[in-house]
Image (cartoon, rainbow, N blue to C red):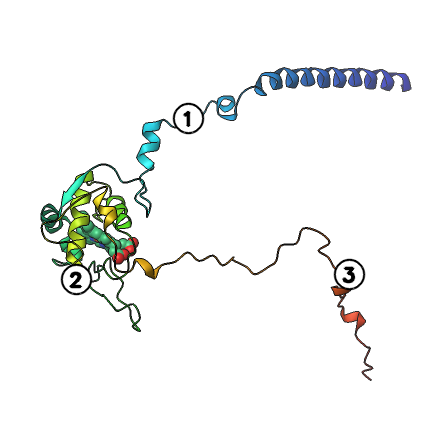
């Protein structure tokens, strides 16, 4: 009886060892080629983004004008487009229809208790206006406008704010020459998020550390 148990357990041990060995070999043979693949190839999903795909997302225009595509548009052309695609929400003269935002007016109101922030009174750069119109407007069909249409609409919104004349035409260069009235109302805030002097060495000063515990308080007898 004793012997039989021994034989069985020996056989079992042998089986386990064989299984362990084979799974170790399997893992080794799987791991070797994997190490040379990148993750995408190993899982066979995804593909590198093509330059055309990236271009579709990479549409931001910076305050210094970098990102503005080549093109041009006139106040006159912008007025026609605005009437068709924008006036129903922003009003014929940018005064805002219903609860939709105003695009013009509010000059000199920024110090008031209720400042009226519009493109003319508040926005610091023309390139931001161009970027915003292309990216987000018209509200019901964002990114549906052609490059030249965006130039025209930008010109017209600036005209509504008395920043451009009725016969003005703008392109990627002249748009950046226009100084917005509130340009200097913005500045770079260099304050850190938290006030804390950086310490790289001997930062923990023993003398400044105090162990505070309720056990350290003097005992009060409550009889
Ligand atoms: C269906 C209504 C609607 C139409 C049409 C529309 N807009 Fe707007 N527009 C909005 C709304 C709503 C906002 C505010 C969006 C927000 O704050 O997220 C806005 C915001 C803006 C702003 C920013 C205003 C600010 O000071 O914050 C500009 C500029 C603008 N629209 C331009 C246009 C132009 C140009 C067109 C036409 C091509 C247009 N919009 C068409 C609804 C509309």
Is 92 left, or right, of 177 in this rendering? left
Q: Residues within 10 Å of mark 3 (few under 14, many from 20)?
A: few
Q: Residues within 10 Å of mark 1 (few under 14, many from 20)?
A: few
Query: Which element type, helix, strand or loop, lies under badge 3?
Result: helix
The residue under label 1 is 48
Q: Quadrant of residue 12?
A: top right
Q: Is mark 3 within 8 Å of ligand 1?
A: no
Residue extending furthest right? Answer: 2
Q: Residues within 10 Å of mark 2 (few under 14, many from 20)?
A: some
- Between the C-alphas of marks 3 and 1, the distance is 54 Å
Q: Earlier in the sequence, mark 2 or mark 1?
A: 1
Is 63 left, or right, of 211 in this rendering? left
The residue under label 3 is 206
Q: Earlier in the sequence, mark 3 or mark 1?
A: 1
Residue at screen point 11% across, 48% down:
84
Residue 171 makes an appearance in the image:
yes
Residue at screen point 26% across, 66% down:
116
């Amino acid at each position: 009886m004793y012997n039989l148990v021994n034989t069985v357990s020996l056989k079992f041990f042998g089986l386990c060892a064989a299984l362990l060995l084979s799974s170790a070999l399997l893992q080794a043979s799987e791991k070797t080629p994997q190490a040379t693949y990148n993750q995408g190839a190993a899982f066979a999903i995804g593909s590198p983004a093509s330059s055309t795909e990236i271009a579709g997302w990479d549409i931001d225009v910076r305050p210094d004008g970098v990102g503005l595509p080549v093109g041009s548009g006139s106040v006159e052309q912008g007025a026609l487009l605005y009437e068709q695609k924008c006036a129903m929400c922003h009003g014929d003269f940018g005064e805002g229809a219903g609860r939709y935002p105003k695009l013009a007016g509010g000059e000199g109101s920024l110090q008031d208790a209720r400042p009226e922030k519009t493109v003319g009174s508040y926005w610091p750069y023309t390139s931001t206006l161009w970027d915003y119109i292309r990216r987000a407007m018209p509200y019901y069909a964002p990114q549906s406008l052609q490059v030249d249409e965006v130039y025209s609409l930008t010109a017209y919104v600036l005209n509504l704010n008395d920043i451009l004349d009725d016969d003005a035409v703008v392109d990627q260069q002249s748009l950046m020459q226009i100084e917005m009235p509130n340009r200097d109302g913005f500045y770079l805030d260099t304050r850190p998020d938290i006030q804390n002097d950086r310490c790289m060495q001997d930062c923990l000063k023993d003398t400044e550390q105090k162990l505070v515990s309720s056990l350290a308080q003097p005992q009060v007898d409550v009889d």
